[in-house]
Image: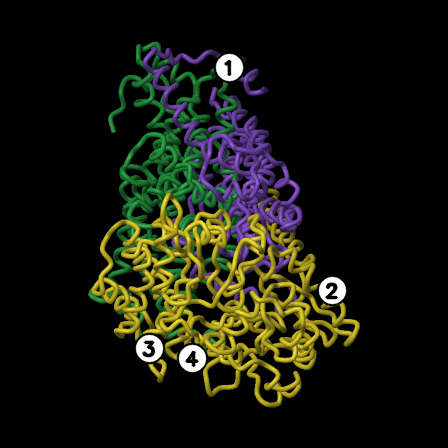
Amino acid sequence: MTRTALARPSEPAVRKAAPGEAPAPRRSGRRRIALPYLLLLPALLLELLVHLVPMLMGIGMSFKELTQFYIRNWSEAPWSGLDNYTVAIDFDAPVGQALLKSFLTTCLFTVLSVALCWFLGTAAAIFLQENFRGRGILRTLFLVPYALPVYAAVITWAFMFQRDNGLINHVLHDQLGIGDSPAFWLIGDNSFWALLVVSVWKGWPFAFLTVMAGLQNIPRDMYEAAALDGAGVIKQIRHITLPSLRSVNQVLVLVLFLWTFNDFNTPFVLFGKAAPEAADLVSLHIYQSSFQTWNFGTGSAMSVLLLLFLLVVTGVYLLLTTRGRKTSDV
Amino acid sequence: MSEHVRGRTVPRSPMAAPRSFLWTRRIFLTLLTTFVLLPVFVMVSSSLKPLEDVSGKFQWIPSGLTIRPYFDIWETVPLADYFVNSLVVAGAATVFSVVVAIFAAYGVSRYEFRGKRVFTVTVLSTQMFPGILFLLPLFLIYVNIGNATGIALFGSREGLILTYLTFSLPFSIWMLTGYFDSIPRELDEAAKVDGCGPIRALFRVIVPAASPGIIAVAVYAFMTAWGEVLFASVMTNDTTRTLAVGLQGYATQNDVYWNQVMAASLVVSVPVVVGFLLLQRYLVAGLTAGAVK
Amino acid sequence: MRRIRAAVTGAVTLSLAFTATACGGGESGEATPKTLTYWASNQGSSLEVDKKVLQPELDRFEQETGIKVKLEVIPWSDLLNRILTAATSGQGPDVLNIGNTWSASLQSTGALLPFDAKNFDSIGGKDRFVDSALGSTGTPGKDPAAVPLYSMAYALYYNKQMFKDAGIAKPPTTWDEVIAAGKKLSKGGKWGLGVEGSNLSNNIHQVFALGKQHGADFFTADGKADFTSDGAVAAVKQYVDLMATQKIVAPGNAEYAQNQSLSDFAKNKTGMVLWQTPSQTFASQGMTPEEWGVVPAPVPSGKPGAGRQTNSMVAGINMAVFKNTKNLDGALKFVKFMTSDEEQVILNKTYGSVPPVKGAQKDPSFADPSLDVIRETLASSAAALPQVPEESQFETVVGTAVKELFADAAAGRPVTTESVRAKLDKAQQQMPKK
């Protein structure tokens, strides 16, 4: 990344100290070494209890024939080897096909949703950086979607997306005269866009909040210096704001990605137990394949496949975004 | 409003904003506000209509207004109990999650140690497993802990707190590490030179400097717990049910009380929005506290 | 040293604080002989209404037996998942309500107490219950996993004023008459019949009855999925065609899943619905009992009966005992109490359902013409949904197939025998391999 003269007057504070300056732990005895571990201990214990152990159990489940006949006593469920996996990835059969389609839908949905959330959040945070009349009110209003309980927010959208009685069709069809007949939003192909709208509406305030917090750490004198150099608003945003947000953005985008990819509540409330094919997100799909059809083995196998995919994506993402930075930044 | 006052004390930004920028901003913010407020408007207007009207065609101007839904909501479901449950669960989960995350993020951000990478990657990877799948294993673990120790984790608020605090932990640690990283090390080094131990340096210097980030993380942790539906639906009972699940009580076997859902959602969201409003002051307070001068 | 102590203190305080919270409060799931936990399903217009209805009865039970019943009313959206987790962990209620169509599925988990001769004796005998209701309590040939508590059946509800305005003299009894009446009603923004196209269970209930009329059963006699038989395809097509070709169902109904078809009916927007005991909902939507009429659901011959003249599934709620109960004796006493003639009259009257107990059916309070239709249907022309362990999967996959076909019809895409068969074939392949 090229640093322009703009940033020279004072090195961006958010940049990492150069490797040499990093306060490498002075090896002054065992307590020095123990401290970081103690700091991590509570987090580690909690993760073990609530995430890691259940996750390992889940992986174990994926190798068992865990249908309704065995859920009362898991240890008695017969081992099924890779059967659950072969069913899940047999793309010639309906189960595998449906999973693949659901997976691709989820990928497209996630990319669009994350991009829009990030864009809206960052743009709003930058626009609200300056003080002007009504700024405080807007800042609060923008957090409202985030403050509403998910169920309430999504059921309201479902209410608005109703074909015959909803606000969306009232505006689009009745008032603007788009389309010959009112469109369906909760079933059929449009459901993808309905889901995207709800997801962005619900997700972007989080990006806004995070970026807003990130902006607070950019020293003002950097802008002052840049302004003295004659840089306009756009240049300042491009050369100071966005680079300074890099480490926050790195986290934010990944958080939004994983969050959106695994989102269950939104499609579940919006569409009920069976999502339309066009909006059949993989989390709901797995729910259907396990809870609805009481086949927890196959559901687990699908989840493990998903986990592997997300691990790879995250790994690649971290490699790409941290290229040229110290490993400890991860 | 206080932040206006505060805003004025900050030197006028050097971002000399051209006219085109101002117009872009105006249009963008107007559109965004409309997008954000549209469902809120629908909620408010629907909550003031009788049931027969809500289930009919949408109208901008309601034919009749009633405040009855705002009274009925307390009768249809024990809304107040659910609200208290949600507040306790989400509040406790937030506090614990943020404290645990601060410690962990401090360790990751400021120390080099063996296994750091493994720790970060492991913690992060826990976010990738679909929640639906470890629902049953976790339930089983809680039941077994309960049988072995007598600590009731399933069906209780405590079990839910434990679950939710761990849900938000990975991202909280990670985000806080990012925020802590952006605080120059010279600051805590200076504190250490002044004789502070690492923990005091953390709370004296880093936590205040990262307060906007911590608040962002706290809000995230709170909302994770506040809105979660799936685990709450199987891990709670009558007395511990949270709002996220309880609101579904307005959709019964034969009726969906749209007007009451909307009214109840608004009522329970007001305290949260007010809470956000108060927190915002601290969010911008970091403007001065976090700046390196 | 100070630093490390600070760190340790921090960590320890935190974990202590944590344990402290974890220790406080909570209820132990232990059942002592003097208490029972009862999970009731949501039958009334809200959870609170159910509590108000049931609590006095539970108090009476406590007076009679000294056993205190802890009531939890569970919304339908959570009930099955709660039962599943209870079955998995062994931690559950002592007595619970289940949807009667889940009986065989839940029976196969082994979590419910089988009602063998001895258990039936302790609640007053098997022959107290109506036969059709007993037919929906588990796999045939096995001891029932539950006993019937409330019974319901489908019937055709029609809007009297709309029928009068359209000049329809007599409510329809055959499908041809339904379509003829529907066509007369479907004009000027009004429609003939309402359906809940996105409600999976409702779709299943409707196509099951139609399937019977085509001689199809969706499962073979030995319990294998058989969704693509000519009869099944014809039944599903006939149901979806009400919208696709007959055009007596509004396209918008394809997305209905929250009983919008009932509010349309109450608002005089549709003339007919096929439903189970909707009178409470009509009332809450502002429709008085005088405004609607009810006749048995249509059959090919116009005369409901067994076999191809079946016009409804056996709908209802069953009561089951959780096998892990530590108070079996008390649990059975409670089942006996709830299925006693006296309680059956009180509860079914309140909920607008029909008692599955013969003694209670004779009570004069059920001598209501609208309930007569239901009772008659249950007695002579209702059939139980397939009592196979895979019933739950069947509802999901076939219900979804019908939902998708309705979506096609609503979007104006053709619904052909081939497209119906293809959807059902896909559904069948999603069923667990046997």
Q: Dot 2: what SS? A: helix
Q: Is residue C263 above or below residue C76?
A: above
Please tell me in which quadrant of the rendered image residue C45 appears.
bottom right
Chain C drawing hue:
yellow
User: Which chain corresponds to the colour green?
Assistant: A
Marking on residue C412: none
Q: Is residue A272 above or below residue C420?
A: above
Q: Mark 4 points at which residue?
A: C306
Residue A43, percent from left and from top: 51, 51
- Which residue appears farthest toward the bottom when viewing the image? C117
Separation of disc 2 and disc 3 at Cα?
46 Å
- The reply to whether discs 3 and 4 touch (Cβ–Cβ < 8 Å) is no
Residue B39, percent from left and from top: 46, 36
Q: Name the residue under label 1.
A: B10
Graded by Cα atoms within 10 Å as few (under 14), some (14 to 19) or many (20 or more), the crowding at tag 4 reads some
Between C383 and A9, the one nearer to me in the picture: C383
Chain B drawing hue:
purple
Separation of disc 1 and disc 3 at Cα?
81 Å
Residue A154 appears in the rendering? yes
| Callouts 2 and 4 on one subunit | yes
Q: Mark 4 lies on which chain?
A: C
Separation of disc 3 and disc 4 at Cα?
11 Å
The C terminus of chain C sits in image quarter: bottom left
Considering only order in the chain, which callout, 4 or 2, is on the residue closer to the N terminus?
A: 2
Between B253 and A174, the one nearer to me in the picture: A174
Graded by Cα atoms within 10 Å as few (under 14), some (14 to 19) or many (20 or more), the crowding at tag 1 reads few
Q: In this view, does B51 lie above or below C145?
A: above
Considering only order in the chain, which callout, 3 or 2, is on the residue closer to the N terminus?
A: 2
Q: Name the residue under label 3.
A: C215
Q: Dot 4: what SS? A: loop
Separation of disc 1 and disc 4 at Cα?
84 Å
